[in-house]
Amino acid sequence: MAYNYKDVFYLSAQHETTNSTYGSSGVEGIVPIDVSAYVDPIARGKARGTGLALYRVHLDASKSAQGGTIAVAEDGVMRIGLTVKEYATTGDNVSGISGNQLTCASDLLAWGMDFMGSSAVTPSTTNVTVNKLPDKEVFLEPSDEVPYIIVRDSLNWIFNSGSALNADIHWSIRLECAQVTLDTNTLNQLLRTQTA
């Protein structure tokens, strides 16, 4: 498979982080995104195992599910990522994100960014793609040539607040993906890497 219009498809999800839940620093959220329909690591007969290639991630922040622009005075700091790490508990205001799970040092982190909402940011935070604005910094992403191959059943969308959010934020994410066939050696290596 390759990064082209014949092979790539979109997966999308939405999640709201409320100021009542994320009203201080260090609040964690873990939101599972089920990708089991696209991943089958077990080879059957001549059929090889398959994985999900993640090429690009698009994320926007808005004040409503319909996509309204966030107010200029929005304050808060959030680190956000997509990981193949499995967690026992999911939801908002849960614990489980530890160590280097939200850094480039984690083999399980497929994509990551920092969000800084502040009245001092110009232009203000709006509902556009994150890597087009100065207040959203993507620090880790796969590439068209080397996608992140997912061989686990779920991809977890993780949040960690660096400071209190002063308003609710609606996040929308779009993943550009392709289902890929994997040879046994590659699949075994990925399964070892993604088991944590």
Image (tube, rainbow, N blue to C red):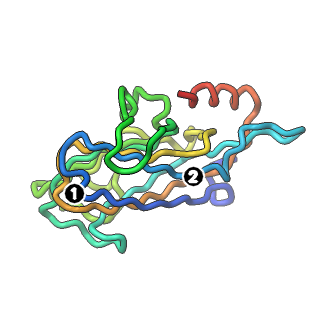
Q: Is residue 72 left or right of residue 62?
A: left
N-terminal-most mark, 2 or 1:
1
Disc number lying in front (2 or 1): 1
Residue 153 quadrant = top right
Residue 171 quadrant = bottom left
**Callout 2: 10 Å neighbours few (<14), some, many (20+)?**
few
Q: Is residue 195 left or right of residue 116?
A: right
Residue placed farthest to the right in the image?
45
Residue at image point 39% right, 42% down: 112
> Whole-percent x and y of residue 36?
64, 49
- Amino acid type, label 1: Ser
> Whole-percent x and y of residue 132?
32, 55
Q: Which mark is residue 3?
A: none
Secondary structure state at the residue bearing disc 2 = strand
Residue 21's place in the image compared with 185, above or below, is below
Q: Is residue 192 left or right of residue 12?
A: right
> Whole-percent x and y of residue 98?
36, 30
Residue at image point 47% right, 38% down: 87
Residue at image point 49% right, 33% down: 108
Secondary structure state at the residue bearing disc 1 = loop
The residue that label 1 is drawn on is 20
**Total marks drawn?**
2
Residue 147 quadrant = top right
Tell me, yes or no, whether the two marked residues, 2 and 1, touch with CB atoms within 8 Å: no
> Whole-percent x and y of residue 109?
46, 36
Residue at image point 39% right, 56% down: 59
The residue that label 2 is drawn on is 34
**Callout 1: 10 Å neighbours few (<14), some, many (20+)?**
few
